[in-house]
Each structure stands twice: as C-alpha cells, then as structure tokens.
Amino acid sequence: MTSKRILLLGKRPDVMEQLLRQVHEAGLQAQGSTDLATVHQAFNARDFDLIGLGGGLEQPERHLLTAEFRRRNPTVAVVDLVAPLAVAQLRYHAQKQAKPLLSDLQTSVPADVEIRFSATEACALEASFYYYGPQPVAQVVFAGAVPSGANTLVISKALLGPGPNFVALKTKAGEILAGRVQS
C-alpha cells in the first residue's frame, strides 16, 4: 500500500510545527500550513488523499476549506483533529481500507450536550470531551455499546470545560471520529 498524502491545516504555527514533527516521527508524511488565506493557491487538492483540520479552526473556516478542497478533489478525506489524538487519527485514516464505522457527527447544547452520529454496525464506543487549559484535558463521558444506525448520546453540559470543547468517539478498532462541540 502506498502511503496517503496528508495536508494539515491550522491556525497556530507553534502547534503546526509540533504536530508535523510528531506525524513524521510516527512514519507518516505530511505537509502543513497555517496560512489559510492562500492555502488553495499554495496546495493542489488533487495532490492529497487526507486533510486534517486543526481544532482552532472555527466552523465557518472548516466548512469553506472542506467545500473548496472537495470541489477540487471529490475523493479527498477531511478529518477534524483533536490535538491529543491527532497522530492516532491520522494514522488510522492513512491506513484504513474499509468504509468508516462512524459518521455524521453533530453536536448541540440545547440543555445538555447532544452528540448525534451514525454507526454502520453495533459496536463498543468510548466518548470523551476534550478542552484546552494550560494542557489538553480529557474526560471519558460514555463507555458502552451502541446499536447500528442513528445514535444520540445526551451528556450533562456540566462536564464541559472552559473554552472550546471537542468530542471524540473511539471504537475498539482504533477509529476516532471527532469534532468541536457546537453550543
């Protein structure tokens, strides 16, 4: 199998430098950019199989970047990265052959945190909240089995940390589906 061509996009140069070093140490090849204004001129979407979006990107930026890269390369996979899990997420997506088990992640916080997603088959799942204090903080908020089809987990919003929060759904097979908690 040839290795996937990976492009990492984020906001903070210091985080990008550290992530690129970790990705290369993990044996993956990637390029990265924090210059979002010129990213489509600097990189050809057809040159990449996988694009990782950093957690600091706001939803409108994520949407615009994803739409434009997929317009130029409909087969490119786009993954929302959570810093403590980024290398594991990239490794999984770079090596996977089959269709993902988890998809369609959406979150909202009407009263509590609602985490909606689809599973192609029943599986054991661990859901964690992540936020950034001086260091990343993770808290497992659900561990158990979920059925195939559409699923909703309702978690107390008291478990959210300060600042931007992220949710990561992990399967025993190593698949990680992550995204920002949208309040």
Image (tube, helix red, strand yellow):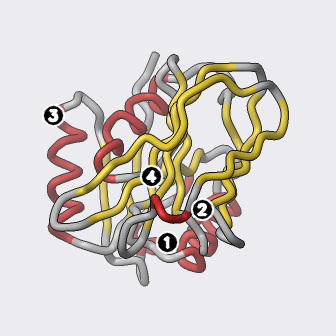
Whole-number angstrom distance, CA of label 1 to CA of label 2: 8 Å
- Of the two numbered discs 1 and 2 on the same chain, state the one appearing first in sequence: 1
Q: Is residue 61 visible?
A: yes
Give me the residue at 45% from left, 31% from top: 94
| Relative to 127, residue 130 above or below | below
Q: Is residue 67 visible?
A: no
Q: Mark 4 belongs to which amino acid?
A: Phe
| In front: label 4 or label 2 | 4
Q: Mark 3 belongs to which amino acid?
A: Glu
Quadrant housing residue 142: top right
Q: Which residue is mark 4?
A: 129
- Foreground: 173 or 113? 113
Q: Which residue is mark 2?
A: 69
Whole-number angstrom distance, CA of label 4 to CA of label 3: 26 Å
- Of the two numbered discs 4 and 3 on the same chain, state the one appearing first in sequence: 3
Whole-number angstrom distance, CA of label 3 to CA of label 1: 27 Å
- Of the two numbered discs 2 and 3 on the same chain, state the one appearing first in sequence: 3
Left or right relative to 137: residue 6: right
| Relative to 18, residue 145 above or below | above
- Dot label at residue 40: 1
- Density class for disc 2 (Cα within 10 Å; few <14, some 14-19, many ≥20) is many
- Density class for disc 3 (Cα within 10 Å; few <14, some 14-19, many ≥20) is few
Quadrant housing residue 133: bottom left
- Density class for disc 4 (Cα within 10 Å; few <14, some 14-19, many ≥20) is many
Quadrant housing residue 3: top left
Q: Position of residue 105 (x, y in %)?
A: 67, 50
Q: Residue furthest bottom?
A: 37
- Of the two numbered discs 3 and 1 on the same chain, state the one appearing first in sequence: 3
Q: Which residue is mark 3?
A: 25
